[in-house]
Image (tube, rainbow, N blue to C red):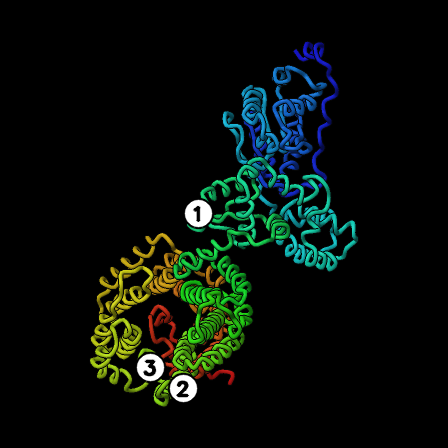
């Protein structure tokens, strides 16, 4: 048959096949998957963004041993990277294939000739850079039909490399997404050209380009050609990132060419400017943009979802969870070449401002929100309304972060730099009196924002750094004459010190605030709301410290307090009073206080969960173990049914439940609960989750795996030191002392118990009040080293 065709048409030598890439690492799984499919005569599409290595994988497949032995000389590699997408039609498409097969072109009946040639034996046809013809402006349907016709033959296997996910629909394709390289493979690829760079430095450098193969190659080639040392390369990267990635010519050698090829495709051009504006926004937002909320963010742009789909179909963008985002090199290129403010940015600002009190949005998108806020506050143009709305949004953002997902932020420098004394209002009619009022509002807004930054810093362990914004906030509060704000924030800071277990400092702050309450008058009179907050916090600290007469005093004053305060305001006081009664074996009094804790049915209401745990604990102390177990089981069942297991309040309750399960002997179930929480606390350490590793140690202590328990307690101590936290530091040392006792090392045990004692003094807690709340934090009674140490047992005097 082939001889007959040769007689009728001029046959030249088929195109020379490309060789296997010289440097080719980290793609063995993809090569194997493609090879296995092609040997079964299934068609394969390698899909991914420009520069990701699709053509290299195709070349490796083409030259693989099994492929060579199966298809022999019937392997054809057709390149479409040297043709303009706007010039592609059915004729140019078929001519490219004819030349690869070895036929002189042009020919009138090209399709029939190709079909007959492919029919003669087992054939592998590789169509490289297939997006060129799949996205053609002319004859796209006919080209797809032609591919369907070639692939319909049982002896033909087709391998496509393409950026677009839209491929001929009538053939069954094995779609293989080509991801960036793994870390180790990326380093190996770079070191094949430039071996004299440390792996740790290299990982940092290559992670900045998301281990993108073309970017890695360009960086390595630049280092070799310029004979750069590792430090020279890092310096060059810091100062000329975009330039380094745009060197070279053609799709395979320049990031600029490969990206611009995608941006100039007909699929994008027909969508107009919107697709480019959306791309700018995706490049601007560190996390990318939420696919779910796309229409809500841009409600007036009718084709916004079509644009997002087009970006993903052409592999310019990709979906990472719910976020449409970009690989780092693409983000870098777009940010450098399309860096003017997108008209869509205002829509993003408005969306975040409108939803800033919704914790689920803040938790999911806090990196984006912070980035938008920094840009917003740097670009206020000294406009009063812009500054006011920016500061209000920033304050709300910091508040939600503090309460639901504490993280360090970079907002302080930009907020501190805001000049709120020299602003102008775009409303020219505003009078002098209103200007003065707006000036006060600005000063107060900046003060509140700085106070909130300070608290967040404090919560994530930046205690020294927190002092600077706090001092600035105080200065602004005094300038505006708002001493109520000043005292109110003393109360909040005292609460932070309580979170750290530093009750002496908290009490000192509250006493200062109480002096304000009694001495200020006239225009500086404090609000009743602030006074009540101060007095209740002071009462809570007295209950925690268990001062003599505190419980009796609170019990006697409760009727009066109920008249003065709303019930929910007394939740915290009832909580600590109940535990103080519990620890003094006044079970009836404890039950009274715990029962009076009014809570809602909201799953985010931490007091609801507190009350349930407490009532279960109380039932156990009263000897009603069945009731206690029933309450715990109900709670655990309900918590585990909640869809979002990453909610902070849910994680906190699960950690405590793990502690209770371990105390009951259900160590395995406790481990299942606590293990994922340890990972979270390691990545997102704050005072909110400081107890997770401690409770993991308690679980292992119950399971008598003392070495693992000791590791957790030591990690807990390290975390506590980094956050200046005292409670769990003291409790972890006590637990390590118990482990030392079990192992017979009484010298080490004494040292840990001495540290525990000193930490109690620093906190202002009597040692018998070290565990003033849930019993899940207390090691089992069989660990009695601490009790024996307090009694002065002689075994701890060895070596003195």
What residue occupies the far bottom of the structure in this picture?
A: 519
Q: CA distance from mark 3 to mark 1?
A: 48 Å
- Return the x and y of residue 409 as percentages of the image width and height: 51, 65
- Return the x and y of residue 29 as percentages of the image width and height: 58, 39
Q: CA distance from mark 3 to mark 2?
A: 12 Å
Q: Residues within 10 Å of mark 1 (few under 14, many from 20)?
A: few
The kind of secondary structure element at disc 1 is: loop
Q: Residues within 10 Å of mark 3 (few under 14, many from 20)?
A: some
- Return the x and y of residue 461 as percentages of the image width and height: 50, 71
Dot 3 and dot 1 residues touching (CB under 8 Å): no
Reading the image, the residue beneath label 1 is 300
Per the rendering, the mark at residue 406 is none
Q: Tell me: 545 left or right of 248.
A: left
Q: Quadrant of residue 91?
A: top right
Nearer-N-terminus badge (3/1): 1
The kind of secondary structure element at disc 3 is: helix
Task: Name the residue located 62 percent from the left edge and 41 percent from the top edge.
Answer: 50
Per the rendering, the mark at residue 531 is 3
Q: Is residue 15 above or below residue 295?
A: above
Per the rendering, the mark at residue 512 is 2
């Amino acid at each position: 048959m082939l001889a007959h065709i040769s007689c009728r048409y001029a046959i030249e030598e088929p195109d020379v096949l490309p060789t296997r890439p010289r440097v080719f690492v980290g793609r063995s799984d993809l090569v194997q998957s493609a090879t296995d499919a092609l040997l079964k005569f299934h068609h394969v599409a390698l899909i991914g963004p420009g520069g990701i290595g699709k053509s290299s994988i195709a070349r490796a497949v083409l030259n693989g041993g099994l492929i060579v032995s199966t298809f022999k000389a019937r392997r054809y590699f057709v390149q479409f990277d040297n043709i303009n997408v706007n010039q592609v039609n059915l004729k140019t498409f078929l001519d490219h294939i004819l030349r690869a097969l070895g036929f002189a072109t042009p020919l009138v009946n090209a399709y029939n000739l190709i079909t007959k040639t492919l029919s003669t034996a087992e054939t592998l046809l590789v169509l490289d850079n297939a997006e060129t013809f799949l996205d053609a402006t002319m004859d796209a349907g006919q080209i797809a039909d032609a591919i369907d016709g070639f692939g319909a033959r049982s002896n033909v296997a087709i391998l496509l490399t393409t950026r677009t996910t839209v491929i001929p629909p009538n053939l069954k394709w094995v779609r293989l997404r080509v991801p960036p390289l793994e870390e180790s493979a990326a380093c190996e690829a770079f070191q094949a050209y430039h071996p004299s760079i440390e792996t740790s430095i290299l990982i940092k450098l290559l992670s900045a380009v998301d281990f993108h193969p073309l970017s890695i190659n360009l960086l390595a080639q630049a280092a070799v050609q310029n004979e750069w040392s590792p430090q020279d390369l890092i310096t060059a990267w810091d100062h000329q990132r975009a330039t380094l990635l745009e060197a070279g010519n053609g799709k395979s050698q320049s990031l600029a060419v490969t990206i611009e090829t995608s941006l100039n495709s007909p699929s994008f051009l027909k969508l107009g400017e919107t697709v480019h504006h959306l791309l700018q926004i995706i490049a601007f937002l560190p996390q990318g943009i939420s696919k779910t909320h796309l229409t809500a963010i841009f409600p007036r742009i009718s084709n916004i979802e079509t644009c997002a789909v087009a970006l993903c179909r052409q592999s310019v963008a990709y979906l990472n969870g719910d976020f449409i985002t970009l690989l780092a090199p693409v983000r870098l290129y777009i940010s450098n070449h399309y860096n003017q403010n997108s008209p869509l940015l205002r829509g993003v600002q408005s969306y975040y401002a409108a939803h800033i009190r919704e914790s689920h949005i803040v938790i999911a998108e806090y990196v984006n929100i912070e980035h938008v806020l920094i840009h917003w506050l740097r670009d206020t143009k000294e406009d009063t309304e812009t500054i006011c709305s920016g500061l209000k949004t920033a304050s709300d953002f910091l508040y939600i972060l503090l309460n639901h997902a504490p993280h360090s932020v970079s907002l302080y420098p930009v907020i501190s730099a805001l000049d709120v004394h020299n602003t102008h209002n775009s409303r020219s009619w505003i009078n002098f009196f209103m200007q003065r009022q707006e000036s006060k509002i600005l000063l107060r807004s900046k003060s509140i924002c700085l106070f909130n930054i300070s608290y967040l810093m404090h919560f994530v362990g930046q205690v020294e750094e927190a002092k600077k914004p706090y001092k600035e906030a105080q200065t602004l509060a005094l300038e505006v004459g708002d001493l109520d704000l000043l005292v109110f924030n003393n109360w909040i800071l005292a609460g932070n010190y309580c979170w750290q277990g530093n009750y002496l400092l908290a009490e000192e702050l509250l006493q200062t605030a109480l002096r304000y309450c009694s001495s200020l008058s006239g225009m500086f009179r404090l609000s009743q709301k602030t006074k009540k907050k101060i007095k209740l916090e002071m009462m809570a600290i007295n209950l925690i410290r268990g001062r003599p007469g505190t419980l009796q005093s609170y019990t006697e004053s409760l009727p009066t307090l109920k008249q003065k305060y709303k019930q929910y305001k007394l939740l915290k006081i009832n909580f600590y009073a109940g535990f103080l009664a519990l620890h003094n074996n006044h079970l009836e009094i404890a039950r009274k206080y715990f029962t009076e804790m009014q809570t809602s049915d909201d799953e985010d209401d931490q007091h609801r969960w507190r009350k349930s745990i407490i009532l279960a604990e109380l039932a156990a102390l009263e000897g009603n173990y069945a009731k206690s177990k029933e309450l715990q089981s109900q709670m655990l069942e309900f918590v585990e049914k909640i869809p979002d297991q990453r909610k902070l309040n849910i994680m906190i309750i699960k950690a405590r439940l793990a502690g209770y399960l371990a105390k009951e002997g259900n160590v395995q179930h406790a481990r299942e609960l606590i293990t994922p929480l340890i990972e979270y606390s390691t990545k997102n350490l704050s005072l909110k989750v400081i107890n997770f590793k401690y409770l993991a140690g308690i679980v292992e202590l119950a399971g008598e795996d003392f070495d693992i328990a000791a590791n957790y307690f030591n990690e807990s101590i390290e975390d506590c030191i980094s956050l200046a936290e005292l409670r769990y530091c003291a409790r972890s040392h006590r637990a390590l002392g118990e482990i030392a006792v079990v192992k017979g090392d009484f010298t080490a045990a004494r040292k840990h118990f001495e540290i525990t004692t000193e930490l109690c003094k620093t906190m202002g807690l009597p040692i018998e009040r070290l565990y003033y709340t849930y019993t899940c934090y207390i090691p089992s009674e069989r660990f009695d080293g601490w009790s024996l140490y307090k009694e002065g047992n002689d075994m701890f005097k060895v070596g003195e």
